[in-house]
Image (cartoon, grey):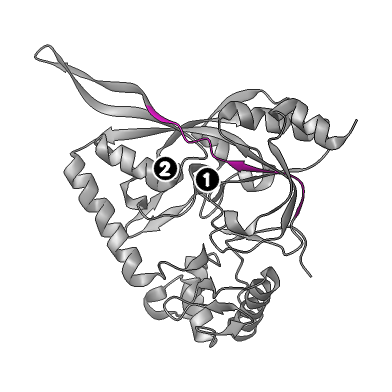
Amino acid sequence: MDILATLEGYVGRGRIKLAEPLARYTTLRIGGPAEYFFTAQTTFDLQQAFKAAQAGHMPITVLGGGSNTLISDAGIKGLVVRNQSRAIKVIKKFGRVVNGEMVVDRALVEADTGTMINQLVRFSCDEGLAGLERHLGLPGTVGGALFMNSKWTKPIAYVGEVLYQAKILAESGEIKLVDKQYFNFGYDQSILQKTREVVVSAIFLLKKEDPKILWQRAQTSMDYRKTTQPMGVSTAGCTFRNISQAEAFRLATPDHTTSAGYLVDQVGLKGYQVGQAKFSDKHANFILNLGSASADDVKNLIDEAKKRVEEKYNVVIEPEIVLLGTFN
């Protein structure tokens, strides 16, 4: 049977695009075509796309907000699914009875993984539920944040810290419920980076707090982002993972900073440009697309930074952004 017909048998006729350019779906605005492309609007759509890829004997790649991602100029083979499933709801409240009335002190909030993190943060702040407010301004989706265990550093706050449970697509295409411990969260890490499983929704355990205080914290984080990171430009976010505290002590970095951006700056690459790709003048851990950068331009910057830092400091810095497709 024709592959396109097989895929459409699961997701619906006319919903699969061929050779769809992917640059428009990434924050870096770079990327070649998807062999087959599908937009999932619901968790059911995600299930069907997973089954379709299995039936077509092809790999499946799920894109959320397209941040922390570099797609090759050659594009991606197989089925690429853009996750646009964005439902959010409070599913349970916990508390105690005071003078005959229920006083809520915690709640479970479920968000589909296509939900933008900013959307979830704003929802939780408005509901007076604490735990995610520091992440205001974080690009990308709930799914991407779980994949990377996204963080905020002033003070340290990880998305994975407030995860309670999640719903994951099993190989059979059915949904299984897993606990927080399943993810084996670490610095910029989760089990998803090894298993490449598809998470369809996440359930967060959040504490009740005054919405005004939550919005103040959220705005403080947002203000700090604006003063330290490039805004309003095409970038994938931080390019490299920070180094360990042990490496920072060995290298005697100022205040023992673990910042990868500091190392990239110190090897003379802040503002360095290849083609239309450039390390930001504001923060050396961000690569900017000045308008028509290729994926190879960005990859060349990544390779140059890795080489110079290793030569000068004997440290191997690892990319935080995920490379998809084939590179030269």
Residue displayed at 14% across by 15% down: 101
Q: Main secondary structure of the magenta part?
A: strand
Q: Secondary structure at mark 1?
A: loop
**Is 23 rendered above or below residue 95?**
below
Which labelled disc corresponds to residue 198? none
Task: Tell me where residue 203 sits by quadrant.
Answer: top left
Q: Residues within 10 Å of mark 2 (few under 14, many from 20)?
A: some
Which labelled disc corresponds to residue 185? 1
What residue is pinned by disc 2? Answer: 161
Q: Which residues are magenta?
A: 76-89
* Residue 79 falls inside the magenta stretch: yes
Q: Secondary structure at mark 2?
A: helix
Image location (x, y in percent) of residue 129: 28, 36
Image location (x, y in percent) of residue 314: 62, 79
The answer to whether residue 170 is seen in the rendering is no
Image location (x, y in percent) of residue 301: 63, 77
Q: Quadrant of the C terminus?
A: bottom right
